[in-house]
């Protein structure tokens, strides 16, 4: 051998294939089974030792919990808005004022050109004080004087008929009309123009609606009901009371 090296040769006898008997086979299996068992035990022992070693190293350590903290600078944050809730106040219902009646105005008519002249007070006195012509009374016989009262009117003339009078009728009693329910609930106002006839006794006999705005809400009916209850000092023609037509505007207003 070169360099003084020694080489040793080991001869391992292997069983020949096809020539191993039962005894040799049993010895061969027992040997390798023992080796495999030792290797398996060693591997498991290493794994168990590693687990215990890791547990010992981590024992006593307190787990750390991460805590997220946020800080708000109150100096930069605007104050919270506080909405002021006002209590709901129920609006009062509008106060309905009683209708205001204007000063009565009689209906004015033009005097026909062919109408007879009306004597004034002095002319009437002269006629009454003039001496009576007795010749006109011949053949009438004796008789007593006839005293007449105020003549009764024969029907009510229309508003277009002119009635001479020297003094207007004067209102003596007025009844305020009621406010119609529908108009009061809707807070609506209205105007009604009525024409009515005041007879010789100052009583309102006939009432007509000349104009109404708005219509159909009850203003006309309430105005007519009220005017029928009015009382007047009758108009005069000289010293005699006469019946005349009067025009009146009635306004229904809602007080604010």
Image (tube, grey):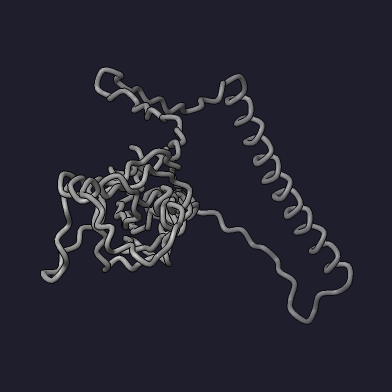
Q: In which quadrant of the rendered image does the C terminus lie? A: top left
Residue projecting furthest to the right: 22
| Residue 183 locus on image (x, y percent) | 43, 53
Q: Say which of 232 and 216 sits in front.
A: 232
* Figure quadrant of residue 78: top left
Residue sitting at x 34%, y 28%: 81
| Residue 124 locus on image (x, y percent) | 20, 49
* Figure quadrant of residue 176: top left
Eyeballing the image, is 144 above or below 78?
below
Q: In which quadrant of the rendered image does the N terminus lie? A: bottom left
Residue sitting at x 69%, y 49%: 39
Q: Say which of 28 and 129 sits in front.
A: 129
Q: Say which of 121 and 143 sits in front.
A: 143
| Residue 193 locus on image (x, y percent) | 31, 57
| Residue 5 visible somewhere in the drawing | no
Residue projecting furthest to the left: 113
Q: Say which of 90 and 100 sits in front.
A: 100
Residue sitting at x 45%, y 57%: 143
| Residue 112 locus on image (x, y percent) | 15, 69
Residue sitting at x 16%, y 53%: 119
| Residue 149 visible somewhere in the drawing | yes
């Amino acid at each position: 051998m070169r360099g003084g090296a020694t080489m040793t040769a080991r001869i391992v006898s292997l069983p020949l294939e096809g020539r191993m008997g039962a005894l040799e086979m049993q010895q061969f299996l027992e040997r390798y089974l023992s080796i495999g068992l030792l290797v398996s035990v060693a591997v498991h022992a290493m794994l168990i030792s590693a687990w215990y070693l890791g547990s010992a190293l981590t024992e006593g350590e307190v787990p750390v919990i991460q805590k997220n903290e946020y800080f708000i600078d109150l100096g930069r944050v605007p104050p919270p808005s506080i909405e002021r809730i006002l209590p709901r106040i129920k609006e009062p219902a509008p106060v309905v004022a009683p209708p205001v009646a204007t000063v009565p105005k009689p209906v004015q008519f033009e005097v026909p050109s062919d109408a007879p002249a009306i004597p004034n007070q002095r002319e009437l006195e002269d006629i009454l004080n003039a001496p009576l012509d007795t010749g006109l009374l011949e053949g009438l016989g004796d008789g007593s004087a006839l005293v007449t009262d105020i003549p009764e009117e024969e029907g009510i003339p229309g508003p277009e008929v002119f009635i001479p009078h020297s003094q207007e009728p004067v209102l003596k009693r007025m009844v305020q009309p009621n406010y119609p329910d529908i108009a009061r609930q809707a807070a609506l106002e209205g105007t009604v123009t009525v024409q009515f006839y005041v007879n010789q006794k100052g009583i309102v006999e006939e009432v007509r609606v000349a104009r109404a705005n708005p219509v159909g809400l009850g203003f006309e009916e309430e105005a007519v009901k009220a005017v029928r209850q009015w009382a007047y000092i009758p108009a005069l023609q000289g010293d005699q009371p006469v019946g005349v037509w009067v025009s009146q505007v009635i306004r229904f207003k809602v007080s604010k």
